[in-house]
Image: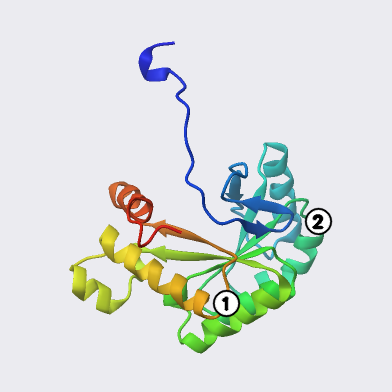
Amino acid sequence: LPQALECRPMSRRLTRTVQVGDLRLGSGHPIRVQSMTTTDTDDVAGTVGQIERLVEAGCEIVRVTVNHDRAADALPEIRAACPVPLVADIHFTHRLGLRAIEAGVDKVRLNPGNVGSLERVREVVRAATDAGVALRIGVNSGSVEKDLLEKHGWPSPEAMVESAVRHCETVEEMGFTNYVVSLKSTDTHTVLAANRLPVSNPHTAR
């Protein structure tokens, strides 16, 4: 192979293990393939059909959007038909996260900066703890807190990481550690820089 295409050994940083359904993520466990459906989640037949095709293609974890009550209503039936761990992507309201946990999902995508009060975050964390459900703490460039935007001047990688660390500390103070972190931006370079910062900084690496 040309030098640029040579397969080089890759070392992985030791992290904590996160349990998502019957799969373990992080540490020395295999890197898992996850994808997301594009259907309206309240279309149960369409959503389950797409999940089946994703799994046939090698998908190991599937995420569905839960952006309204009709989507939450459909979750129990989708969960029963889904052969792999199911993740609920909730939108702004913690109540949908609580409903997703009740429906039996394996992980909930939670953006603590978008659900309102700290007490609402606590409600979701308590429910996830009781049900053995993992959380994905998500920080988007558009959801960085106002004080961090003022501090950094824009939703910079540093601002995103500081926001994520703040949210991680919040849930860990509640005794919850079964979570993963997602840092996303509309700018590719910002995404790369934001995801490299926690790894390179021993004070933020988890």
Q: Regarding mark 2 in the picture, which secondary structure is present there?
A: helix
Where does the N terminus fall, quadrant-wise? top left
* Residue depicted at x 43% and y 18%: 6
Q: Which mark is residue 34?
A: none
Q: Regarding mark 1 in the picture, which secondary structure is present there?
A: loop
Where residue 128 sits in the image (x, y, percent)?
65, 74
Corner quadrant of residue 103 = bottom right
Does residue 48 appear to the left or right of 11 in the view shown? right
Where residue 195 sits in the image (x, y, percent)?
37, 52
Q: For label 1, count other residues whose C-alpha is less than 10 Å away and answer few (under 14), some (14-19) or many (20+).
A: few
Q: Nearer the viewer, residue 63 or 125?
A: 125
Where residue 65 sits in the image (x, y, percent)?
59, 63
Corner quadrant of residue 150 = bottom left
Instruction: Give the residue type that dot 1 points to.
Output: Gly
Q: Nearer the viewer, residue 147 or 57?
A: 147
Q: Is residue 149 above or below residue 174?
A: above
Q: Residue furthest top?
A: 1
Where residue 164 sits in the image (x, y, percent)?
40, 67
* Residue where numbered disc 2 is placed: 81
Q: For label 2, count other residues whose C-alpha is less than 10 Å away and answer few (under 14), some (14-19) or many (20+).
A: some
* Residue depicted at x 48% and y 27%: 9
Instruction: Give the residue type that dot 2 points to.
Output: Ala
Corner quadrant of residue 66 = bottom right
Q: Is residue 110 above or below residue 120?
A: above
* Residue where numbered disc 1 is placed: 175
* Total number of numbered discs in the rendering: 2
Does residue 97 appear to the left or right of 146 in the view shown? right
Which comes before the other along the chain, label 2 or label 1? 2
State which mark lies toward you, 2 or 1.
Answer: 1
Question: Pointers 2 and 1 in contact (CB under 8 A)?
Answer: no
